[in-house]
Amino acid sequence: MLYYKSREFIGFFIGLLSVLVALSPSPIFYIALLTLSSLIGYEVSRAIAFRFFFFAPLTLFFSSISLELGLLCALLLSLYVGWKSWLFEDFLKALLVCIYAGLLLVFLLQLKELESYSLLKLLFFVWAVDVFSYYTGKKFGKHPLALRLSPKKTWEGLIGGALAGALVLILFYGLKGLIWSVFMVATALLGDLFKSYIKRTLGIKDFSHILGEHGGFTDRFDSLIFTAPLYLFLLKF
């Protein structure tokens, strides 16, 4: 395997690019976030046979004005699709794309507006959990965590990722970070399992292959977009 196609190189490149985007001026970050929303929206839409992937960045746009407008946008767009086809399945597909690939990403924008370094801390936490979960599970994993949802995920991997994530948060926030890590690791795991549920029920391995062994953008950023709302809540309250 060529080095530039390896899992480690692609992971490092994505990480470096994410840091640069997180530290970029607000307009550039906003454009990058709309682009990520479009990419995730496209991958999810293609997987569930839904045409209107642009509903995702549209929902994100209105959510960036206010969360209330974003939620209203998601519901009205879903209603429009369901009304046109008169299929409740299409209504639910639209709602999934709008919320998962659109509305959830606005919390990353809110973290950026709160403080760029808060977003960086979240990135480091998610990376630590993902990386140590993967390599600990690969080296020591014997006991499946959720066999039906994610066959390769193990309890040993979860423990390794949880310890790494807790260490990162302790370094940033002290003892408070240890308490936070319990909830944030669980949320990161649920973000991964949420994505895995969609893939398993659809019978696909990854949402795309654009990022090599990392799959697609949906596969790579699943835990990040799930933990962002909780992290923002903890920072505020």
Image (spheres, rainbow, N blue to C red):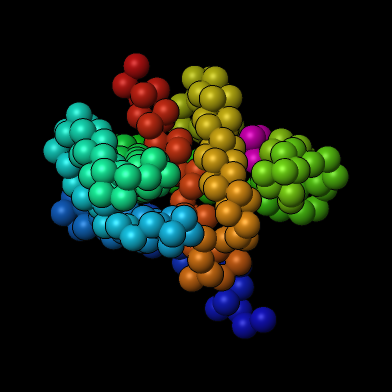
| Left or right, 183 with reference to 146 | left
| Left or right, 61 with reference to 103 | left
Residue 197 location, quadrant? top right
Q: Taking the image as drawn, is residue 218 in sight? A: yes
Q: Residue at x 17, y 34 (%)?
A: 69
Q: Please state the extent of the stretch shown in magenta in the rendering.
A: 161-165
| Left or right, 127 with reference to 119 | right
Residue 113 location, quadrant? top left
Q: Pick the residue in front: 224 or 190.
A: 190
Q: Pick the residue in front: 38 or 184.
A: 38
Where is residue 28 drawn, in percent x and y? 20, 58
Q: Is residue 162 in the magenta section?
A: yes
Most common secondary structure along the magenta stretch: helix
Q: Residue at x 63, y 57 (%)?
A: 203
Q: Is residue 191 in the magenta section?
A: no
Q: Pick the residue in front: 107 or 46.
A: 46
Residue, far bottom? 2
Where is residue 213 drawn, in percent x and y? 60, 66
Q: Residue at x 17, y 42 (%)?
A: 62
Q: Residue at x 32, y 54 (%)?
A: 37
Where is residue 167 drawn, in percent x and y? 59, 34
Quadrant for the C terminus in the image: top left
189 to 25, vertically: above or below: above
Q: Taking the image as drawn, is residue 110 in sight? A: no
Residue, far top? 237
Quadrant for the N terminus in the image: bottom right
Residue, far front? 86
Q: Pick the residue in front: 99 or 13.
A: 99
